Image: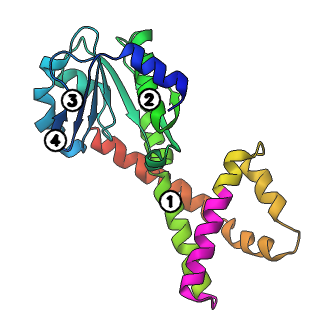
């Protein structure tokens, strides 16, 4: 969390009620913010107990996958100030990115508090159209798993090519991690960075000819993101 975010959080918050793993933590009574961090499958068990803690100044921040603002309004109150957010697992090391969408009752002050809470784990982007959240879930919410799969596949391919298994795993891990850090720090876009590695007629070009074939990585990724977005819509009813 940045110093500015920490100051904002300290200034704005009276009580923060954290709801996770089906239990409530923190003080009781009306809260400045309620964070709902449970699996969507048990949302029905958790939500009824939250209503007494939702006051006129409370902002409810949900990071439940697939659960829409309409569900939260129905479960809590039509007058509740609600923010639906989708973080991702790099949040555990402060390198995540979260996309958030507010309902119309979220004030500027409440949005500032929600932003301060979310920015503790990385970058935050706000959108106005909740309909985009299914695609957000498919890209950044589920995206870390795609990157980890890439590392798995690269390690396995290295072993198949003759490398010792342990060495192949180390090379794959370092390559994926280092390339991600380079992408984060560089002002260049991914296509330019890729082109900078690729010499005409070289080894990288030979590999990319396979990966960028008509039925290659682009098509597979598009299908994967579409499948994840469809599943997000199903979870949201």
N-terminal of the pair, mark 2 or mark 1, is 2
Which numbered circle lies on residue 26?
3
Q: In this rendering, would 8 be left or right of 62? A: right
The residue segment tinted magenta is 160-179
* Mark 1 residue element: helix
Identify the image's colour scheme: rainbow, by chain, secondary structure or one colour.
rainbow
Whether tag 2 and tag 4 are in contact, CB under 8 A, the answer is no
User: Residue tagged by mark 1?
Assistant: 146
User: How much space separates mark 3 and mark 2, taking CA atoms?
Assistant: 23 Å
N-terminal of the pair, mark 3 or mark 1, is 3
User: How much space separates mark 2 and mark 1, taking CA atoms?
Assistant: 22 Å
* Mark 4 residue element: loop
Whether tag 4 and tag 1 are in contact, CB under 8 A, the answer is no
User: How much space separates mark 3 and mark 4, taking CA atoms?
Assistant: 14 Å
Whether tag 3 and tag 4 are in contact, CB under 8 A, the answer is no
User: Residue tagged by mark 4?
Assistant: 22
Q: Residues within 10 Å of mark 1 (few under 14, many from 20)?
A: some
Q: Residues within 10 Å of mark 3 (few under 14, many from 20)?
A: few
Residue furthest right as drawn? 200
**In percent of the image, x 42 and y 46: which residue is there?**
229
């Amino acid at each position: 969390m940045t110093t500015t975010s920490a100051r904002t959080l300290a200034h704005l918050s009276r009580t923060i009620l954290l709801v996770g793993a089906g239990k409530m933590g923190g003080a009781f009574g009306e809260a400045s913010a309620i964070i709902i961090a449970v699996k969507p499958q048990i949302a029905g068990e958790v939500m009824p107990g939250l209503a007494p803690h939702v006051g006129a100044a409370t902002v409810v921040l949900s990071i439940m996958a697939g659960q829409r603002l309409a569900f939260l309004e129905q479960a809590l109150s039509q007058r509740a100030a609600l923010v639906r957010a989708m973080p991702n697992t790099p949040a555990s090391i402060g390198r995540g990115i979260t996309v958030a969408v507010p309902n119309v009752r979220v004030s500027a002050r409440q949005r500032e508090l929600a932003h301060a809470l979310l920015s503790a784990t990385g970058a935050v982007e706000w959108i106005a159209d909740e309909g985009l959240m299914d695609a957000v879930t498919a890209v950044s919410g589920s995206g870390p798993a795609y990157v980890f799969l890439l590392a798995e596949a690269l390690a396995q391919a290295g072993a198949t090519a003759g490398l010792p298994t342990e060495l192949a795993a180390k090379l794959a891990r370092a390559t994926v991690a280092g390339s991600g850090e380079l992408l984060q720090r560089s002002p260049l876009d991914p296509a330019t960075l890729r082109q900078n590695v690729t010499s005409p007629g070289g080894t990288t070009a030979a590999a990319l000819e396979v990966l960028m074939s008509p039925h290659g990585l682009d098509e597979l990724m598009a299908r994967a993101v579409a499948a994840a977005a469809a599943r997000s819509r199903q979870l949201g009813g």
